[in-house]
Amino acid sequence: MKVRSSVFASFILISEVIGIALFLRGFFPVPVKSSLSAKNRLSDLPAEPLTGGSVNSSRLPQPLFKRVVIMLVDALREDFVFGPNGRMYMPYTRHVVERGSSNSFVAKARPPTVTMPRIKALTTGSIPGFIDVVMNLNSPALLEDNLIWQAKTAGKRIVFYGDDTWVRLFPKHFMEYDGTTSFFVSDYTEVDNNVTRHLDSTLKRDDWDILILHYLGLDHIGHISGPHSSLIQPKLLEMDDILKKIHSALISKEAEGSLPYLLVLCGDHGMSETGSHGGSSEPEVNTPLVLISPAFKRKVGMEKPGVVEQVDLTPTLALGLGLPISQNSVGRLIPGVLDETSLRDQLRFLHLNGHQLSCLLKDSILNYEKEAGFEQFRVAEKAHGSWMKLYLEGNTSEVLTNMGKKVLKQYLEALAAMSSALSKQLGKYDLYSMIAGMVFVFQLLLVLLLAMPEALSGEAAVDLPVLSVLLSLPFYLLCLLLASVHVLVCTSAESSCYFCSLSWGLVFAAVAFSSAMFCILVSMAARQLPLGPKIHGKSPLKSSGSEWSLSELDVLLLAGTVGHTLSLAASSFVEEEHQTWYFLLNTLCLAVFQDVCRKYFREQRGSGDEEDHILPSKDYHSAHPKAEIFSEKWLALATPPFTLLCCRLLRSLNQTGVQWAHLPDVGHWLNSSEHRTVLSLLAAFCLVLIYLLVQRRCSWVSKVALALGLLGVYSYRAAVGNVLFPWQHSSRATSKGTVEARFVYVFVLGILFTGSKDLLRSQIITADAKLKSRGLWEIYSGLVLLVSLLFRAHNLPVLCCCLLIQTLMAQFIWKRLHYDAAQTTIMHYWFGQAFFYFQGNSNNIATVDISVGFVGLESYVEAPAIFLTALSTYAGPLLWVCHLVCYLSSERDRSPVAVGHGCYCLALLRSVPAAAYIVLVTVLRYHLFIWSVFSPKLLYESMHLLLTAGVCLIFNTMEQSHSPSKS
Amino acid sequence: MWDHEIRAMASTHAIIAASVFMATVLPAVLVPGFSVYGTHLLWLYSVSAAVTAVSVAVFWLLGITPPTKKHTLGYKLSRLVRSCLYFFLSCLFFHTVVVLYGAPLIESAVETFSLAVLLTSLTTLRCLCVLGPSVQAWIRVFSRHGAMSVWDTCLQITVACTVVGAWVGAFPIPLDWDRPWQVWPVSCSLGAMIGYLTGLVAAPAWIHYHRKQLTYKCK
């Protein structure tokens, strides 16, 4: 089956989008969340179970503790306390663990073992998923139901000293706080002294109920010199002294009759043997959890500490303080804490915990009735009810106690089963779906690569052996094999898997598709291979029959594409990806400059001027050939330096990235209120320039519409208060500018309509190439108008420079230097990438300008808001790609297959980094920065792929409409 | 073929490389507190000065510089002045290019200019020595198939290596390793230096192995 390059490319891209969607679904598991948006309240708590009883008491047992001190030591590893060196490192703690009234456990933290998600886990009891973090980037505060909120609502007074992550997560929750920043990792003394200095005065006072201390020093030492350095011991001794101080203060404050205190020593995560954390190795995951309270039994010697989950602390603390357990908590009550309370209270506590877990289970698992834990809980609840009945009747026999013990055991089993069923849902990568998605993408990428010689040939058509493959035996065998693998994996997988839960029809389609792709791949490879050695020895991929020598520019374009893809493996290069693109773009401009110089200085002697006359120069009539050529030479020579200058200026317009994002930039300067006049002048100038640059190739109707639209853009900006009208001196009350924005929208739609009308006419009636290129250009100018409305006023120079560079480059560089479609496409792609960052984007979700979604809308409407936000975020790449369509289709008389080639190259350029990136993300899924750096970038990559697939479809129609006219 | 030239080239390059080495070692002995990272600018200038002095001396002694047409003192002086002017202009050119690549405009202008001086003394100076102050010759040498002697080829290779070295040297700057050699412009100047030294080794070697294929058309 012969397919045109553009059809082939768009087909591959769309299939890749599906593959990546599958991968994303596996990579970001759906978080387990209660469907209720409200937080748990005391009044919602279930009544105590009682069979046949009429009086359902919803009484809560008395809180176990009055005051709680949580001492969180960052990166406190389990063996620092319980290990053989523990006696040396933390003598007092060890003494309390062995002899005092305490309970000690090894608490397992879930990866990613990074502080912020760990704090969230400790306070909400849930295991934050990756998508969760991405979704909550706009609000640093923790909005989920959590322990701190519950405590504050219940009127507890909370004091906090330590890592300021807490302060950001819980603004206004603390009665008193002092946040220390973990910015300077090399400082491990001051950070802790800043916490300890408050301790004496606070411990003397009585006006708090919960005291939280978060010590960062140990973590910093770990990062500097690892867990075996000589700095560790003094630091741990210091921590031990602090614990002793708090403990003795609590003991001295202890009054007869009142409730006891609770002192918690815990770590948020451990540290690996090199001192870092974030992964899932044993030393990173295991943290100590020591609960000290007179309410516990005195220990008589060192026991092996039991193993609990880190999130188990949340329900324990909540119930201990008499608070409702937060909604999304998957933890279960630590049983050792309850040993000294009455059996009724114990059962009641367990019942409350079980009820909360079963509610969560109902919300998050589809067929929750089948879960073993849920069933067990129902049984235990019933038994509890009948036990209560007997108990209230005053039965005090041994039978009752035994029965109670049995209920207790049932509850504990039910809790364990439910908790594990829930936590299996989260914090786990659905590897099977990820791998399936990855296999799809890679098959497609390989097919795309193998088709290169055919797709870039003069015919621009790819011969896909679809029919022969579908009728071949290997295809059916492969189908069977894959289907059986699927069945095998799905039946043996213990955790839930998205790909397995798909319907059979879909799965079979996927299996058939994948095996067909594989067979096509093999047959295409077999077809390519015998050709390879015949033509060239070295590069069978690149050789297209004739001798294929790479110029410097080609080397740069190839090396840049490959190098950029490789650079994505380093988190810094992902954070600072804009630097990569600026750097490559600069080099590209210099290389182009060299080409231009070579053409005009060196080769002019040899070939003379004939080269310029070969070109169908419509615009330049040879009235003054000498002067024309002369001025053209200098303009061509000036274009690359001018582009370089523009790029340098734009680069200082918006500082993005991480390391240098704080530096002052021109954008901030322009946006400050003193410089509003400058901004107004600049915006007006840019709009005029945009008009001049765009109107050249429009029909007069569009020209008028464009002018009015740009006026509307300015008045919209004036209405919003960004810029000033000359006659308006004082800043008047700002409005939302809805009317102005809608005014512009009307013109955008009008221009788009005229453009598509021209396109349709050219296609159906006249087959006029000129009309068609005008229609395309009008659509492009409609897009420009829309983008100029959406861009912030200080970003208008970006748009302006974009148009200017496009015009100059098209006029003097791409046409004159005879760059082929592939080279032009790569250059357009690079420019598009650079402009993506010029407009202030980065690989961080936080830089997405959400306010764009409200332009011209009275209130938030989801679909247009998402469309507008996506459009304005990807405006740079989109504008360049649209320009590419215009340029290539106007170049058709030179090479009729240019559009097909461009489309193919674009697909290749986009799929290579996307495919490489999903492999990288899979490999680095336990990396420290997987949340903060790699996951947002993954979302950006997928979004970009989706948009490119859309643009490729447009390419497709462009080419399609051409082919009938040719024949 | 070209054996004599290759030998001369190899020894010239050995002398220049030795001068770079001495320019690093001598200040380390003489100046207290000298280090390549710590007092980077000092190292930069000492290397630039050494390379400049040694190249000029060696190439003058070898007599590769194209013979001047006139032997008047005035003409020689004007050539000298022009060479100095070109040297300075090339510094400015490199400075501009580096700023266009994203170096801060005002903040660390001294560092940027020092890098430009180093790049100039590694590349432009050699052009001045081999080709003399004539733009025409430079354009000829740096266009495709423009080399007309072994020295031209050698010049192409060393200049390309130096520039590519400086270019590659910029890569580690965004990494968050906080190493002393990531400070601007240390990595770039080290890259340029390493590229230059590689070029010094690579040029004679390449020419030696390709001496059969090398053909130059005369003017």
Image: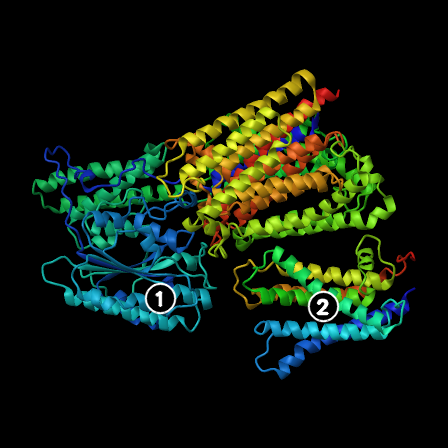
Say if A673 sits above or below A856 in the image: below
Is residue A581 shown left or right of residue A48? right
Chain bearing mark 1: A
Disc assigned to residue A426: none
Q: Quadrant of residue A364?
A: top left
Q: Which residue is drawn at the image coordinates 51% and 42% (left, top)?
A: A683
* SS at circle 1: helix
B134 and A814: which is toward the camera: B134
Q: Which residue is mark 1?
A: A191
- Mark 1 Cα shell of 10 Å, populated few (<14), some (14-19), many (≥20): many
Q: Quadrant of the C terminus of chain A?
A: top right
Residue A959, given in percent of the width and then of the height, sits at 67, 26
B60 and B189: which is toward the camera: B60
Is residue A417 shown left or right of residue A448? left
For the residues labelled 2 and 1, the Cα–Cα distance comes to: 48 Å
At label 2, the amino acid type is Ser
Q: Which residue is mark 2?
A: B121
Residue A42, given in percent of the width and then of the height, sits at 19, 42
* SS at circle 2: helix
Residue A329, given in percent of the width and then of the height, sits at 31, 45
Pointer 2 with pointer 1, Cβ within 8 A: no
Residue A897, given in percent of the width and then of the height, sits at 73, 30
Chain bearing mark 2: B
Q: Which residue is drawn at the image coordinates 24% and 41% (left, top)?
A: A40
Q: Which residue is drawn at the image coordinates 73% and 61% (left, top)?
A: B161
Q: Quadrant of residue A511?
A: top right
Is residue A105 shown left or right of residue A741? left
Is residue A696 shown left or right of residue A362? right
At label 1, the amino acid type is Val
Residue A365 in view = yes
